[in-house]
Image: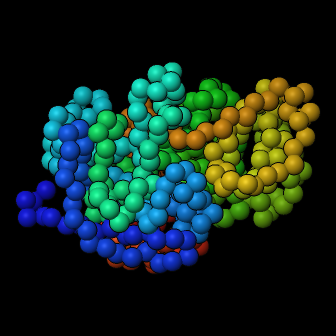
Amino acid sequence: MSPRQHTGRIARFDEPGKPFEIDTVPLPEVGPGQILIKVTRANICGSDVHAWHGTFATRGLGGQLPTVLGHEMVGSVAELGEGVTADSNGRQLSVGTRVVFPYFFCCHTCRNCLAGRRNACLNLKMAMLGRADEPPYFVGGYGDYFLLPAGAVVYTVPDSVSDEIAAGANCALSQVMYGLERVDQQLGEYVVIQGAGALGLYAVAVAKARGAAKVIAIDGIPERLELATAFGADFVIDITEVTTEKERAKLVRKLTDGQGADVVVEVVGHPSAIDEGLKLLGQFGRYVEIGNINIGKSFQFDPSRFVFANKTMVGVSLYDPAVLSRALDFLAEHQHRLPFERLAAACYSLDDINEAFAAAEGKRDVRASIVP
């Protein structure tokens, strides 16, 4: 960071329904253990759009307004606080090193952290929950900088992986990797992915890399279904063509040798998908619920079908921070075979963030990105 640089911009989010305001604010003092990150790219994730609409209330997680949204990001080290010399894998850090990091921060000392459940830390802090009208100001990804707190997990981005590809690692990719790890998806299993947005596409790729015998993606947008095939889906189901749950369940049975899926991953984000997804599972099937983050939504459920078929449902909120390191390895290994660059095709400057969110809302391919 240049010694002459004393300020930076943030896109202040005052409340749902109001446009973002671009503010120029002082850069914070970087304390011991902290890292000041120069944000180079921040994607617009579905949860950011939900927060923008007010359907995902950051205040419900202890957040405050005004704040700075944005969490799926990549950046470079602008300044290292006292005592910080290496990333969480022991690799040397210096000004200019490209890094990614979980957007949530664990205490590492509470009961859950000590039990290996750091994504359920009892003292969890997150990006997007701090105030934008007081220091350190840079509390979310939609700004020139982000202040990484002391003790945060951080990983160096491999030189071979571009910012464009790395930006999705710390949210979408790590989330689905962790979800498939939680249900121990095995070699030779049948996997169904409900929803072919960014998380769904990553899930297709990861399931194939874990040795799935067949991956089936379900969506209703042709562009997404085409991408699902490019990411390795063996079969796609267009809900505008196979229009009923019964027809889709019958087709999944046919495609899985009459067995039903071993694993179904829900990344649609609507409760109505869950009941259908459970019907797609075979005996001892495991259902990975990731998409529904809007509190107060519900669906009707017949538990007998769940019991008699020995099914399991696993809810996945956040991921273990160590997964992010494996996500970077995954990108480095598979980037020349899979079209990761297509997951963030549209770029907008920070000054154009309101236009970016309007585009993201109606986007038919995948995501938009803020490149400050």
Which quadrant of the figure has residue 265? top right
In the rendered image, residue 228, in percent from the top left (x then y), is placed at: 60, 53
Which quadrant of the figure has residue 22? bottom left
In the rendered image, residue 155, in percent from the top left (x then y), is placed at: 31, 38
In the rendered image, residue 66, in percent from the top left (x then y), is placed at: 44, 66
Q: Which is more toward the observer, 150 or 37?
A: 150
Question: Can residue 59 be seen?
Answer: yes
User: Which residue lies most toward the left here?
Assistant: 3
Q: In this view, does 120 lie to the left or right of 276?
A: left
Q: Which is more toward the observer, 79 or 187?
A: 79
Task: State how many labels appear.
Answer: 0
Q: Residue at x 62, y 26 (%)?
A: 184
Q: Which is more toward the observer, 275 or 192?
A: 275
- 105 w.r.t. 358: above or below: above
Which quadrant of the figure has residue 99? top left
- The way the protein has been coloured in the rendering is rainbow
Question: Can residue 162 be seen?
Answer: no
- 273 w.r.t. 289: above or below: below
Q: Is residue 134 left or right of residue 105?
A: left
Q: Which residue is drawn at 26% across and 34% down?
A: 87
For the N terminus, the image quarter is bottom left
User: Which residue lies most toward the top here?
Assistant: 115
Q: In this view, does 32 lie to the left or right of 117?
A: left
Q: Residue at x 31, y 44 (%)?
A: 149
User: Which residue lies most toward the front here?
Assistant: 134
For the C terminus, the image quarter is bottom left
Q: Which residue is drawn at 41% across and 55% down?
A: 130
In the rendered image, residue 7, in percent from the top left (x then y), is placed at: 19, 67
